Image (tube, coloured by chain):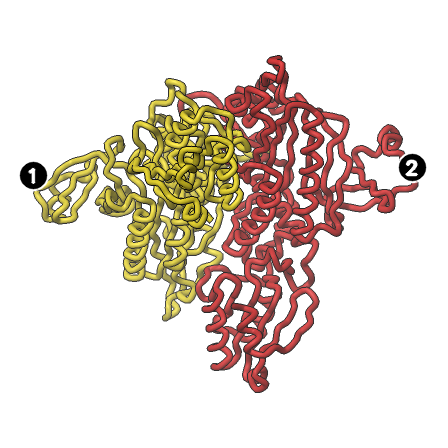
Chain colours: A red, B yellow
Amino acid sequence: MKLSNTFVKTFREVGKEETARNAELLIRAGYINKEMAGVYTYLPLGLKVIEKIKSVIREELNAIGCEEIQMTALQSPDPWQKTGRWDSDKMDIWFKTDLATGGQLGLAPTHEEPITNMMKKYISSYKDLPVYAYQFQTKFRNELRAKSGILRTREFLMKDLYSFTADEEAHNEFYEKATNAYHKIYDRLGLGDCTYKCFASGGVFSKYSHEFQTFLPVGEDTVYYNKDRSIVLNEEVLNDEVLADLGVKREELESTTAAEVGNIFTLKYKFTEPLGLEFNDKDGKRQTVFMGCYGIGVSRVMGVIVEKYSDDKGLVWPENLAPYKYYIIGIGEEGEKIAAELEESNKEDVIYDNRDMRPGQKFADAELMGIPYRVVISDKTLAEGKAEITDRKSGESKMVSLEELRKEIK
Amino acid sequence: MKLSNTFVKTFREVGKEETARNAELLIRAGYINKEMAGVYTYLPLGLKVIEKIKSVIREELNAIGCEEIQMTALQSPDPWQKTGRWDSDKMDIWFKTDLATGGQLGLAPTHEEPITNMMKKYISSYKDLPVYAYQFQTKFRNELRAKSGILRTREFLMKDLYSFTADEEAHNEFYEKATNAYHKIYDRLGLGDCTYKCFASGGVFSKYSHEFQTFLPVGEDTVYYNKDRSIVLNEEVLNDEVLADLGVKREELESTTAAEVGNIFTLKYKFTEPLGLEFNDKDGKRQTVFMGCYGIGVSRVMGVIVEKYSDDKGLVWPENLAPYKYYIIGIGEEGEKIAAELEESNKEDVIYDNRDMRPGQKFADAELMGIPYRVVISDKTLAEGKAEITDRKSGESKMVSLEELRKEIK
């Protein structure tokens, strides 16, 4: 991509109302635009990162037999009334709206009710089970506070997966598979070494649920952990009963802040029972379907990756998530010519900074945008027949021959 | 894909409330699910078709230098108040909702206002122009009627592109390019031979706009045309003034029904002026940006393709849009074994119908789902060392050797 061809710009600073570092950097680097508090547009570079995160998640979920669908934002009250969650006292983050033809609709903050309701058409026998269906969907939550940049927003992209099984045993088997898939996903997203499965409250569903928490200074949650014994638990369940359940003492635990990057719930019959999702078992008896749900906030994960990897110069992307791999700067006539050639040979991985601008500004933008490899081709490097490649993460530079460079980029 | 692994089912019939043939067939074939009037979920097969349509559009727009972004559904009133479209008397399809922190928000039925507003941060000089930005976005429209299946819905996927140029000349040049890209898109979507650029009302923006109309018996619009002179105009502009402008007489025109599959508008300064989107020209003078917009309803186009190609047995997909290319049925032990092998060799293109079901039911589902090639491998075909391939469109069958078949599918 030639930088002169994109409308995206970088900014030295953003307005004071943006207090979250993730959003501040993403806005300055031209990845997102703030529409209003808690509502962000994804610009070309930001959308590319989102799509790469989605691809990682999609591949790992498809690998364990999940099917992708796309449900709707507009929700009719009926299934939510049956589970008691239509009432704004029970679910306080609803956006509701009026239908021109009469009646009220809601904007889905989550999709347990509609997917359970829909599955009544597709599940009637034990032969139809298990079902694992997921989507990447825009969720709407009427949050009172939206001050963590893209970590907590009013409109955001979420991957939500729902499992429907014949019984708890089949559920537990899949729950384990989903847990493993989640670990693979966080590994591939560059968060593997600091993301832990964590005991959390099961809410109204069950005693516990599991969160995936990334240890992070700016995380909104506090977790307690004992690394030797692989125990991590959310502050909200730090009580005598839970400590006894886990067989650990309060003084054996350290605490840290963390950001939730995913959660998995055993929902049991919480939704399937009131909505009447049943099947005929092998003996012809009616049984209620056993359910689980598994979420990853896609835009939130992007924000956590930004928080983890950024430094004082700007963003730092893991290579597999970066919108482009190389940021090429040509200095002087010959350098510009070769930079243009390289971009032509691989438009997908290369940004060619062909703007009429001082090299120093281009160097700063390469760092702010967090592109993994900055390539400089100047009269000086060409005197040796070489180009200079600088690693964004380590800051280390090395000289490579033009021949090697062409081979690597192509 | 093994059919036993998907939750999707086919249905012999759907409820009477679904009167549109496109939605009826798509529901029966397991591509979509109706949530409520005018609101549909995309199931795995339907989502695959949507993604293929998006890819075609994306490729052609990227080829003319457009950049993909993703704006938001939630809209603050401010820019819409400035253009006068916040008022529900002016724009009668708004869904509006209340923010928990106070104030009202809208759900975007279109995005002229927010993108023009956003561009004030990215366009300040003639050097920043032109800008061509598009998105695939869920739009919300509070329609009084939603009776045409996925042709007119309350929540739908739209590709909307916006152009920002320094002047009308630059606009016209791009408008021409966009028109050509649209023709290429309809060609690749299998609608090229029956889709025409059509004069339509410019609404409040200008004298004319252009629609792309697909001639179709169930189309909602009536258009008048003279094929020899390549004139097509919407009934809404069939008046003496327009006939004079086009230099055609009423009696030279025939009429037909058609479905709108796209539209392009020259917006001039309609949005940029009230929102103050200006730039410094080469002489340092402030100028208002010239604007255009270009829409394609992605889910609507899918519905039109269904209407055009389906027959009394079900859906018929063009090969490049079909969710899978081959529908393989093995009859007998050896046939099933080879069918399973073929699916294993190419999971992306092959449906293997491994359900415990009569072959006749499988044949009917292959036709209902509209998969381009049905492949039957039975003891009878294997006696000749062959398989039978049937073309969904023509209904013609031919025998091919297993060797050829393996090569083709792999």
Residue at point 62%, 57% (across, down): A25
Residue at point 37%, 28% (across, down): B25
Q: Amino acid at mark 2?
A: Lys
Q: Amino acid at mark 1?
A: Glu
**Is B256 drawn above or below residue A261 in the view shown?**
above
For residue A249, which numbered disc appears in the image? 2
Q: Residue A121 location in percent, x, y?
A: 50, 22
**Is A169 drawn above or below residue A278 in the view shown?**
below
- A85 or A282: nearer the viewer: A282
Tell me which corner region of the image, top left, top right, bottom left or bottom right, holds residue B199.
top left
Q: Secondary structure at mark 1?
A: helix
Q: Mark 1 highlights which residue? A: B251
Q: Residue A182 location in percent, x, y?
A: 67, 43
Q: Which chain contains the residue that carries disc 2? A: A
Q: CA distance from mark 2 to mark 1?
A: 92 Å
- B86 or A67: nearer the viewer: A67
Residue at point 57%, 46% (across, down): A54
Q: Secondary structure at mark 2?
A: loop
